[in-house]
Amino acid sequence: MPPWGTVGRVKTSRLLTAALICTALAAPVPALAKSRHFQTPSHKIACLYDSKGGPGPHIRCDALFLNDVAFFLDCSHKGKRRHATDTVAEPNAKVLAYGTSKRLGPFSCASRRTFLKCKSRESGHGFKLSRQSQKVF
């Protein structure tokens, strides 16, 4: 039996526990996903930016003046028009005022009185939405 007896084992056990806790706390913590809801002043286009999930960072905008239509954009592909039976609309979402732009991760969105345009700053792809026309590029 070691000269320190039970007291030594308790101290050793506490030291090992403390070392394990310090190691766990020092490990890198994964970045939390960021999501931001926003809408146009008319409340006819509602958008969600999500930094994680699926294809990575992406924006989805619902054209609420069309039936079940959403527009989707990721970093490397052309904007897409999609059928959507759910919505990203949030009644209390921040309004992107006409004449202003917002940077969301690798994207930028510009709100104008007659349209909303979102594009990837990396690829140049995006979409432009208005009541009169909806274009993906």
Image: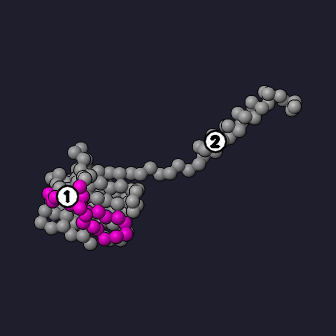
Q: Which residue corresponds to the image point at 35% horizontal and 51% vertical from the top-left? A: 35
Kindly identify which residue carries mark 2.
22
Q: Nearer the viewer, residue 97 or 7?
A: 7
Q: Which residue in the rendered view is the most extreme toward the front?
A: 85
Q: Amino acid at mark 1?
A: Asp
> Whole-percent x and y of residue 8?
79, 30
Badge 2 marks a residue whose secondary structure is: helix
What stretch of residues is rendered in magenta?
65-85
Q: Is residue 67 magenta?
A: yes
Q: Is residue 71 magenta?
A: yes
Q: Which residue corresponds to the image point at 39% horizontal and 51% vertical from the top-left? A: 34
Kindly identify which residue carries mark 1.
68
> Whole-percent x and y of residue 10?
74, 30
Label 2, residues with CA under 10 Å away: few <14, some 14-19, many ≥20: few
Q: Which residue corresponds to the image point at 22% horizontal and 66% vertical from the top-left? A: 128
Q: Is residue 17 visible?
A: yes
> Whole-percent x and y of residue 122?
37, 69
Label 1, residues with CA under 10 Å away: few <14, some 14-19, many ≥20: some
> Relative to 112, is 3 above or below?
above
Relative to residue 36, is residue 9 drawn left or right? right
